[in-house]
Structures are given as C-alpha cells and as structure tokens.
Amino acid sequence: MISEREVAKTLSLIEKDPLKAKEIVSKYPERDYFVVGITGSPGSGKSTMTDKLAEMFAIEKDVAIIAVDPTSAFTGGAFLGDRIRMRRSVKRYNIFIRSMASRGAVGGLSPGIYDAVEFLGRAGYDIIFVETVGVGQSETDIVNLADLVLLVLAPGTGDDVQMLKAGIMEIGDIYVVNKKDLDESQKLLANIKATLKLGGIERDIISTNSITGENIDQLRDIVQGHLTVLSQTEKLEENRKDRYKFNLLNTLFSILRTRYSKTEDLEKIISLYTNEEGENNESKEN
Amino acid sequence: MENKLKVLVAKPGLDGHDRGAKIVAMALRDAGMEVIYTGLRQSPEEIVKAASQENVDIIGLSILSGAHLKLCERIQKLMKESDIEDKPVLIGGIIPAKDVEKLKEMGIQEVFGPGVPLKEIVEKVKEAVK
Amino acid sequence: MFDNEELKRIKKQHKEWEENVVEPTVKRFPERKEKFKTSSSQEIKKTYTPLDIEGLEYVNDLAFPGMPPYTRGIQPTMYRGKLWTMRQYAGFGTAEESNERFHYLMSQGQTGLSVAFDLPTQIGYDSDDSMAEGEVGRVGVAIDSLDDMETLFRGIPLDRVSTSMTINSTAAILLSMYIALAEKQGVSPDKLKGTIQNDILKEYIARGTYIFPPKPSMKIITDIFEYCSKHLPGFNTISISGYHIREAGANAVQEIAFTLADGIAYVEAAIDAGLDPNVFGKRLSFFFNAHNNFFEEIAKFRAARRLWARIMKERFKVKNNKALRLRFHTQTGGSTLTAQQPLNNIARVAYQALAAVLGGTQSLHTNSYDEALGLPTEESVTAALRTQQIIAYETGVADTVDPLGGSYFIEKLTSDIEKKVMEYLSKIDDLGGMVKAIEKGYIQKEILNTAYEYQLNVENQKEIVVGVNKFQTDEDAEKEILEFDPEIEDRQKEKLKTLKKNRDQNAVKETLEKLKKAAKEEDNIMPYVLDAVKHYATVGEISSALRDVFGEYTEAIIL
C-alpha cells in the first residue's frame, strides 16, 4: 500500500497530463480491483449513499472514492461539493476520497479518470467507488468505466416515468430508489418495476433511506453478490479490456477537446461518436 | 495539459459565520478554479486530511471567532506531520493587526481582513501558487 | 385617503411636472444614477405622491398606534410613555469580567442586561472539550455550570432586571440555570423578566450554532414555551430573529420574509404541541437588523408589524389582540461596520439607530465603532450607549408616535415590502413550510445569491462603502482594541476540575439518565434539565446526553 501522500500527488500528475498519465500508471504493478459506479440525478442522495456504502466495505477492504462534479462551461471553475457530504468516510483511515471536476468532458466523467481509477487499483485499493455527475441524456460513460453501476433514483428529482421511457434506465445494474420514507418514493419504485417488466428487463431493485441507513446493508449484500459473480466469470477480464479501450478513446477526445476547445464542430462530432459507441455497447451487453 | 488551481476553503473551529467563505469560494470558482468548500465545524485534522488527499494547491481558512492563533498553530503542525507544509495557507477573517504578524511568523502566507475586494483575493491566491 | 377629484387634479399636475419641470432640468443636470434602488432592488422614484398610496386605508391598513394591525406601533403612547430599552449586548471571557461590565453598564444608565455566550457554551461543549480549544471566552462569556452563572450575576437582583440571553441550542440549559439562580436569591420564577433567543431555525439558515436536527430542536422549543407559560409568564420565550439572516447577506424583504416564515413554523409547532396561540402568542418576540437604507428600514419595521398581525389573525385565528402584536428588539447592522476609518462607524450606527426608533422598536442595541476590529472597549461601548441617549433626549423624535406615518414614500415602501414578503411566504408554503425549505437549502441559496450580488456591486462601485471603496485614506493609527486574556481557557478548565471533584457525581449521573429517558419518551425536558443543572451537571454533559438521544444536524449543502 503506497502512502496517501504519494497517491494524492500521483493523482494530480495524472489529472494534469493524460498522455503522461499512462506512463505514470505503468510504473505500478497490476492488481485486481473493482470499480463500482454510482450515478443518478442531483438531489437523489447518491453522495450520502456512496458515503455509507464505502464505510461498510471499508470494514474489510481498502476503499477509494472518486467524486466527479461538473465544471462550469462559462468560467472553467467548479465546486467539488461531494466530499462535504461524506461525513463517515472522511473519518476512516482506509478510505481515500478524491474530488475531480469534469473539465468539459461530456459523459459524466472527467478526463484522466480512467487512469486515476487504474492507478488507485494498482496503489492498493480494492474497491473504487466512482460517483458521477447527474444522469441526463449523455452522462452514461460510467457504464464504460465501472464493473457495476448503481443507479440512484428519488422522487422530486425528475426521475419519473419520462426518464424511464428515454432508455436511460438501462445503464444501471442495480436500481436504488432512495428516500424510502416518502410516499412518492414507493410510487416511483412501483413505476420502475412495472416499466422494467414491460421491457422484459431484469434488474435488482431496492428501496433505501440513505440518511437513516435503512436497507443500505442489504444494498451492500446485493453489490457484494454482483462483485462475487463478476470475479468468478470472465466478465471482469472483459471489462478490463473494454476499460482500456475506452481509456484510450477518452484520452484522445480530451486531448482534442483541449486543443480545439473552441471548435464547436469538433465537439459535436466527438459527442456523436461517444453516443454511438455507448449505444453500440449497450446492444452488445444485451 | 490542464493547469487548474485546486483550492480548499475551510471553516475551522466552532464559528458559524460562513457568508465570507461561501462568497470567496464562489469568486474563486468564477475565476476558473476548482473549489472544495468543507462546510462548518471542521477540525484541524479533517482540514489537513482533505488538503492532503485532494492535493490542493492552496488552503484557505475563514475564522471570525478570534480563535485563529490556536487553530492555525494546530493546522500548521498537522500539515508538517502530513508532509504538506509547503502548501500556502491564506486566512480571511477578523484578525487584529498584531496577530497578523504572529500568523505570518507561523507560516501563513496572507491574511485578509474585512473589506478586501474579491478581485484582490483571487489575485493573491493565484500569486501564492507561483 | 384622498377623494377622486383631488386624485385627478394630482395626476394632472404630475403630468405637468414630468413634462414641464423635470424634463428640462434633467436635460441639463442628469441624475446621479440611472436607477436608484433599495437593498431589495425596489426602484425609488423621484418623489412620491398621494397617487402612490391610492388604495391605502387609514383605519384598516394603518390604524392608530396600539390598535391592530399595529402598523404605527404596538402601544398607543410608545416612547411618550416609556423609552425603548437600551440594551447593549455584552459578555466576554470569564463570568467575573462580564459581571463587572454589567455593573458598569447599569451604572451608566442601561436598563436591561443582554448576555453573550462563547461558542462552546452555545454549541454544548465544556471549556475543556477538544472542540472548544481556542474558543473559550472569545465571543462571549464561558458558562460551564451553575457555578459560572452565579458569578455572572453576582450582586444583580434577578427580580429587578430584565435579562436577554442570546442562546439557542442550549437555551433550555441556560434558562434552567437562570431559574435555579433566582431560586437561590429567593426570587420565584414568576417574577423573572427577560428573553431567550431560542430560535433554532435561523441557526440552520445563518448563524450556525445548531446541535440537533430540526425535529427534536422544535420539540425542545415548544417544551420551553409550555414550561414558561406555566412558570415564567413574564419571560419572552423566543426571539424570532432576522438580524442574523440580514447579516448573512439577505436584503430587507428577505429578512422579514424568512423571519416571519420562521415565526409561522414556531406557531404551528406550538399549536401542534397543544398550546394556545392566544396565550403563547403574547410572549413571542422578534429581533431585527437596523441597516443602512434609512427609509427602507423604517418601512420594513412597519410592514413587519402589519404582516404579523394579519398572519396571526387570519392564518392562526388568534382572537387576543395582545397576541397579534409584533414586539421586537433591534441591533444595528454589524456587517456595515468598516475596519477602515472606524470613527465613520459612529455616524453609521447613529443613522441605523434612528431608523430603528422611527420604526418603533421596543429595545435597541447600538454597535460600537471598533467592532469590525474586535470586541468593544469600555470607551466605545459608552459612546454607543450615548448614541441612543442622544436620540432619546435631544432629537425629539421620541415625542410623537410613528412620525413618518402618512409620508407617501414611507407608506408606499411599507406596502411594497409587505407585498414582496407575502410572495416569499407563499413560495415557502409551496415548498412544504420553512423546515422543508431550509432542509432543501432554498433559503440559504436565496441569501447567498443576494450576498454575492451585493459584493460584486461593491467591487464595481455600484454600491459605495465610504472609506472602503470611496474616500479612502492611508491609515496608520493602530486603534486600541480589547485585549483578550489567553489564560481564560486554563482558568475555566481548572474550575471544571474543581467543580467535578466537589459535586455529587452519582446524583449528576442520575439526573442525566432521567433526562435521557424523558427525551426519548418525548416528555417535556425542562424539569429534568433544571434538576441536572441544580446538581451542577455541566453544559457539555447535558448536551452530550441529548446528543445521544437526538443525534446531530448535518448542514444542507448549497455550494
């Protein structure tokens, strides 16, 4: 396990230069690790969820959390406001928390995140939670990065049937309907179950209260179950290969984006590519 | 190459006045920096851990309760222990002139009293990193 | 208020004036600004006329002072009968020093005591707690136990003073200490007069000394209402505060809107707890800011009175007129004080104080001119007190009630503020009430946006701060500020050690257990806190026991 200081400094180097990043990461020996993605609308409670889950897994494993927040298109700055919500995880000695800004990347992640994740895995972290920017039409890159995706939904955040119909829902391996204490949450849960059934899609669904912690231990068990299955099949290897491929693509795009950040046409083409690739992969998975 | 400045804006101690900290955080964000605001009631340990893990370029503290000397002492000590004492620390708050001297001796880079324009704070933050 | 014929004539002259008098003048002398605005972005016209208050009715909307809706004042004679209470907030360091300052202020003519507590006391930590390090006795007096309280009020007969305590999360504890102390002096609780701030909602919004989450905090507040309505009928059990909301960056409209919304939440909670608003309504009090925009402030106070009377009457069906009255204390705006050219602050405070008096405040604290630099010295706090005395005895403004009533400008401003406040109240109702609005971060976000906008306006000179962004001087004079004694923390720690040795430790433990049980079972916790306090349980111990039961509040995130 390398020192926290070294981890922190290396992550900064990785964020700074996506090309050099691969060189830097390759210096560390390969290791097995899991990436669990947590995504959902702003206000769904995903940070609190991540916080509690991480704390549970940290009892037996070393855990890292990367929280991504959007960079302002106007100012280029960002509020990295997830760390403040991770009140339990910040207290644990074996949880490493890092905030990253999306820096213009379309897709819900940030440039350098693939390398950052690979590095954390090699640095000794067994489970890396990646909490992304809220889910919209295009924030679906998490599927390419993570071994497992938790989709956190809650009433009052726009997570209604409209979104279900838009097909966004298929990105989740596990559906977490939060704010269990609210009536609307139960309704949302019922809607999702019905919609999935209609589409012939089978997924784990669970109702939670991320503030009181209700059902989070069950969620932990479900997640653990998935991870166990993954490690026993070839899925993990496949994921790793895909991740590497998307890493390269992501690096390419972030370089192009930085060089041509004012060129709207280029932006358009790039996002077209990422959307299409995303769809291609979804159809592959199904 | 992305050279964004990463700044930690922290409220150490029990002081609950966060108008200044939040406004400075907004100004820094609007100036293109990546800002982590810690919220209220941060212990020196929590602040230093955040600064270390996030590997911020600057640490900004907001203290209006008068406890600045004690708190800065503790924070500087912990920064040394965590191997991040090279990171510049800037403070905003109600700090009497003679304490400004003491703080600077402790290693605090800049002390902002009431009435300092945001523009100046943003400039000083940028300068501090060089 | 004017008949149609008269209004028609005025309209005609208005047109004449704009076209024939204003136009040519403005061509040669353009106005200083394109638009003149109040703090709440209300545009101010060149001048105001009866046309601006066309719909206003004297009897229904203004009424005479002492009659609902109390726009002109809550008593018929106001300052002709009794001047406002001159109540300077004080407290620092040890109980001994604070006690000295109290005696000094009383000898100088102050008529009520106001106690400031240090942050550890406000947040439920003892002086020897690690969270308290560096904070003991800084922003107010350190009170760890009844022992310290006894020192604080030594030589002060509790049946002859009125004491205001700025205490919120730990109000039940400090109030219990006050009651226990009175008992020792032989004063029965029903003789006690004073106020506890006891306003937790504004802590979540703007001040930050919360401990527990909203639900149990509201329960503690209604426990105090209930206990006091039975045992301390002369005590104001809450000071619903807008001062801090304003200091956090809100404008005048937001200050009133969010304060009254808090008030609505407290009244609802008390009614839910089975209390009668006709009874506890009489003991509610408010606390506002006196800020810079002179006329807006005066109008603001008047609007607040009218709004609250109508809310209590229409929304809560209160019949007792006394429970419709918005009584308030005012403090001049601390955030308007500048560190640069501190003597300027004397003028600022004077105008702000004047606005509060013309607005009909019941009591007033004037800031000292050196408070941007530190706690006030004896000299500066005296000057602040004199500012009030000069207003009271030399200016003549206290010789008639609501002197600005009927001013077209003031009445228009009053009505406009009332309207805007009601819009906010409606929005808050839509969000599910004030507690929900706070949990969602809506209130905090509104305030922060206003604050940020104001700051940007100062920086681009749209807002002028004399001595700071205009009329600056090169300053070198080091102003004498109050020295803080660093030994305080150690002395308090020693005191605690001695206290814990001398008291009956088992008895303390027992009272704390009983308190926890009562809290769990949702009984009124006041008698249990009182018992614990009498056995010299500390602020930290009692708070800790309650933390175990209620948990702690986590800040709503808005950045």
Image: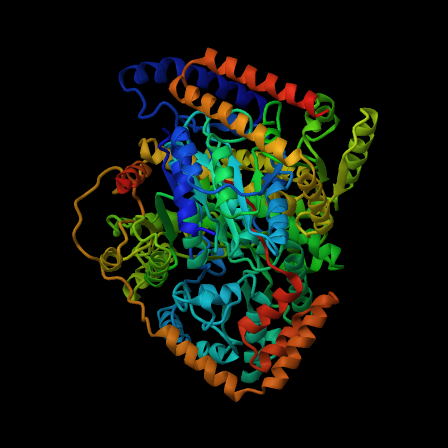
In the image, residue C519 above or below residue C429: below
Which residue is nearer to you in this view: A98 or C163?
A: A98
* Picture coordinates of residue A162, whole percent (x, y): 72, 24
Q: Which residue lies furthest to the top in this view?
A: A265
Number of labels in the image equals 0
Q: Residue at 71%, 27% (x, y): give it.
A: A170
Which residue is nearer to you in this view: A82 or A225?
A: A225
Which residue is nearer to you in this view: A83 or B9?
A: A83
Judged left or right of residue C549, residue B62 is: left
* Picture coordinates of residue C552, whole percent (x, y): 60, 58
* Picture coordinates of residue C483, whole percent (x, y): 28, 67
Q: Which colour style is shown? A: rainbow
* Picture coordinates of residue B114, whole percent (x, y): 32, 48
Judged left or right of residue C164, residue C520 is: right
Considering the image in quadrants, where does the N terminus of chain C appear?
Answer: top right
Q: In which quarter of the image is residue C310?
A: top right
Is residue A250 visible to us here?
A: yes
Is residue C309 visible to us here?
A: no
Q: Residue at 58%, 77% (x, y): give it.
A: C533
Which residue is nearer to you in this view: A120 or B98?
A: A120
In the image, residue C380 above or below residue C475: below
Judged left or right of residue C254, residue A196 is: right
Q: In which quarter of the image is residue B8?
A: top left
In the image, residue B67 above or below residue C529: above
